[in-house]
Image (cartoon, rainbow, N blue to C red):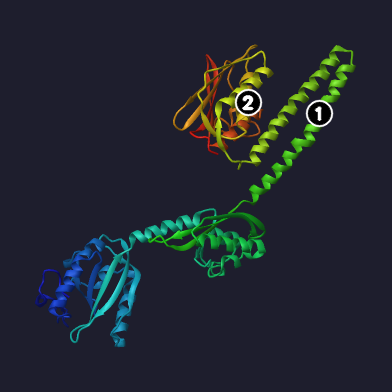
Amino acid sequence: MSNPGESPGDRSGPSADGTVDSLPDPLAADDESFFRQLASNTSEGVLTITEDHTIVFANQAIEDILGYTSDELVGNSKLTVIPERLQQAHVDGLEAYVRSGEKHIDWDGVELPAVHKAGHEVPVSISLWELPQSEGPRLFTGLFRDISERKLRERRFEAVFNNTYQFTGLLDREGTLLEVNETTLSATGLERDDLVGTPLWDSFWFRSTDRARRIAREGVECAREGEFFREEVRVQGGDRMAIIDFSVRPVTDHRGEIRWLLPEGRDITGHRTREQHLHVLHRLLRHNLRNDLNVISGYAEMLASEIDDDEFQAYAAEIAATAAELIDTTETAKKLADSTLERNTRQYAVALEPVLSAVVDELRDAYPESAIVRSDDEDLLVTADERLATVFREVIENAIEHTDQREPVVRLGVTADAETVDVFVTDDGPGIPETEQTGIFNEEPVTQTNHGSGLGLWLAELILDDYGGTLAYDFCPVNGSRVTISLPRRDDLEN
């Protein structure tokens, strides 16, 4: 095959003594012109070699892929662009084909590395065929496609697929496992061949119970119709039963058609166990501990009324007051547990002013010695629920109780922009100690020695987090401290 710009008569090939002689035309003149034009304009590399591995044609695209110009390749061995470790296999393969006497080589889309002029390897896809001709050396043309980008995407996908902590697989549309990630294999102790080719519902995890098999089938059917499926299910783990957050999502091809399904599972056994423990603690706070504290408070009040000694009366009154404080703490802890266990409650548009007014009126009655000063509030709507009053109550009450003033003053202000409503609670006290800020207003970890003593701000922060809001703190040496309650703004009353 000739180089671009040469006439068919100028083409040359190797002779017996190694020189380059004229080669017979493999194609008629019209076919030659068409091939030359096609090869010159394609983005895929084209190389033509003789049966003794000599390159006789290279198009322009080869330079884009491998860095060699046509002149640098024509007349040289094809081994120039083949890695040394694969050269003998290439030589043996072509020679075996020539000796076989066959006239049709079927080598389409084989992925191999080729050597770039700069020395590095380039992944390519090669299609090879023999050019028909009646005489002269046999000619073979290879079509080279640079698949570097595709290989890079595959490596990135594999890195994500095999390094996620979730159990992940790939299914065909019928629900048969095509692939599973390393996390899954490590957790089960199985080999890939033990799982690939098996319907998901018959796989190691889901065949343990009828419910698990049914949910696996439902997930496949739902995703096959283009819907995302998610459900918690108990399955067989590597050495125990496990609860997983199971999902199946459809995966589409470049035409938008569903080609594969992606099942994922996240082990939430520990999370569910901790939740059960929290339920037990919740019941303990709600019933046993609260009832016992009421008994202590009752007996302390009886003692105070029966004892004449002033000193002992003071002791009894202190016991009663401490029990009352603990009862209040258990009530806040109960609310905290309620908010933690019921964090999927639906939020809706709430008018800010009526809720804030009700809380302020309540606290003015409870703390008559304090002054709660409000600015004129706009008629604003926020995303919240019935727990919003608890947020305001805990923050404002905290400002009143933790001041060093005999007649504390708490000022409330409200500002808003297009997305957020901020409620400012400013006091004239000494500020919130750093230990009380841990885990609420900063990222410091809570430890046995570094933690707050109250639960009110924890509760407020937890509820706001559920709303998508925040709780922030600023200390002002002259004017005390300010806590900012930020809430998502709403523009309508639709639920």
Residue 256 location, x and y as percent? 40, 60
**Image check: 14 left or right of 494?**
left
**Image check: 302 left or right of 196?**
right
Residue under circle 2?
393
Q: Residue at x 20, y 69 (%)?
A: 39
Q: Quadrant of the N terminus?
A: bottom left
Residue under circle 1?
294
Residue 271 location, x and y as percent? 64, 47
Q: Residue 330, relative to residue 107: is it above or below?
A: above
Q: Residue at x 51, y 57 (%)?
A: 227
Q: Amino acid at mark 2?
A: Arg
Q: Amino acid at mark 1?
A: Asn
**Image check: 363 left or right of 173?**
right
Q: Residue 364, relative to residue 77: is it above or below?
A: above
Q: Residue 41, relative to residue 276: is it above or below?
A: below
Q: Residue 353, relative to residue 259: is it above or below?
A: above
Is 211 in front, or is 301?
211
Q: Residue at x 28, y 61 (%)?
A: 119
Numbered disc in front, either 2 or 1: 2
